[in-house]
Every structure is written in structure tokens, then in C-alpha cells.
Amino acid sequence: GLPEHEERLKELLREDVAGTAILFPSPDALPAAAMAAVVAGEAPRRIVILDGGWAQCKKMNQWLDPAIPRCFVETATREEFGSTRKYRGQAHRVQTASAFAALWRELQEDPHDVEAVTQGLDAFMSSFEAQMGPAGRLDVLEQRSRHERERKNE
């Protein structure tokens, strides 16, 4: 990122350390459902969601203020939300959007809002899976190649 953006983020986080949480499953992280009791007696007012590969997220987490509590979700599953990642055999690894939807649910946010986020994620995953097909990315590449050949033959 840009240095001025990084500094601005640090400033924002310093303004409300007690009301902020970081969604990251570090060894000292608390279950999100328990976070409300720890963060000023209510759900966090600001939540930092780290998104990227595991190595990138670990680096981002190390860069952020260690005084800000970390939390993790317990209810996000691949069965409920699907997966766009390569770790298909590892049920505990879920995409960031799935973790975010589960976080809202575990923090007992408005059920209508949680449902809207979940429905949006379901729509995205349905579209993603339709594009990928049962064979995955190779299937999409083969379809594109076939389409390009057909256009050349027209």
C-alpha cells in the first residue's frame, strides 16, 4: 500500500482501539461471539477484515497494533458457503466473504442484514460455480478456446 494510506489506517485504528476488532485467527484470538463482552461491553464498532493469501494476511496482522483484539469465527463452513479457494479438503479454511457473513451472524447483527449478506454470497458462489463447472478452471479455459475456434471458423 501507499505509505500515506497505511498511516491513515493506523490513525483511524488508534482513535478507537477499545471499539475495534481484527478478524484473524491468531493464537490469542477470541471467538467472535465472545467479542461483544470484551470490546467495551458491546459488539465492535469497527472491524478490520484482512483479505489475501494466508502469508499476506499474516504479515498484515503483524503490522497492525497488537493491542487491538483479534477474533475468529466458529460457524463459517464450506458446506454452507462453498469455496473459491484451492483448499477444498480442509473444512476450516473458508474464503473471506464467508468469514465476514459468519462474523455478522456470530455478533448477532440484525438478522435481515445477515440474510442479505448471505444471499449475496450465495448468488456469487452460484455464479462462480456455474462458470467453473465440475472440472474447475480447466473447463472454463476449454470453453473459451472452443468459442474462439468457432468464431474463427465463422
Image (spheres, rainbow, N blue to C red):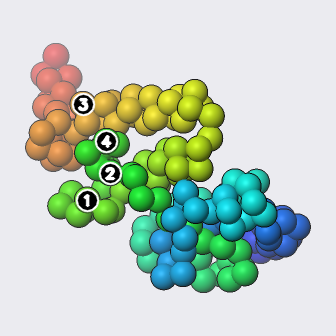
Nearest to the observer: residue 44 or residue 51? 44
At 50% across and 30% down in the image, what residue appears? 115
At 59% across and 44% down in the image, what residue appears? 108
Residue 93 falls left or right of residue 89? right
Residue 99 falls left or right of residue 71? left
Relative to 128, residue 58 above or below: below
Relative to 78, residue 10 above or below: below
At 57% across and 27% down in the image, what residue appears? 112
Displayed quadrant of residue 85 = bottom left
Q: Do the residues labelled 2 and 1 touch (CB within 8 Å)?
A: yes
Toward the top, the furthest residue is 154
**Mark 2–mark 4 distance (CA, rounded to whole Å):** 5 Å
Residue 109 percent coordinates (x, y):
62, 41
* Residue denoted by label 2: 77
Q: In which quarter of the image is the C terminus?
A: top left
**Amino acid type at mark 4:** Glu
Numbered disc 4: secondary structure? helix
Q: Which of marks 1 and 3 is in front?
A: 1
Q: Which numbered disc flags the more N-terminal residue, 3 or 2? A: 2
Badge 2: how crowded within 10 Å, few (<14), some, or many (20+)? some
Q: Which numbered disc flags the more N-terminal residue, 2 or 1? A: 2
Q: Are marks 2 and 4 in contact (CB under 8 Å)?
A: yes
Displayed quadrant of residue 81 = top left
Residue 10 falls left or right of residue 88? right
* Residue denoted by label 4: 80
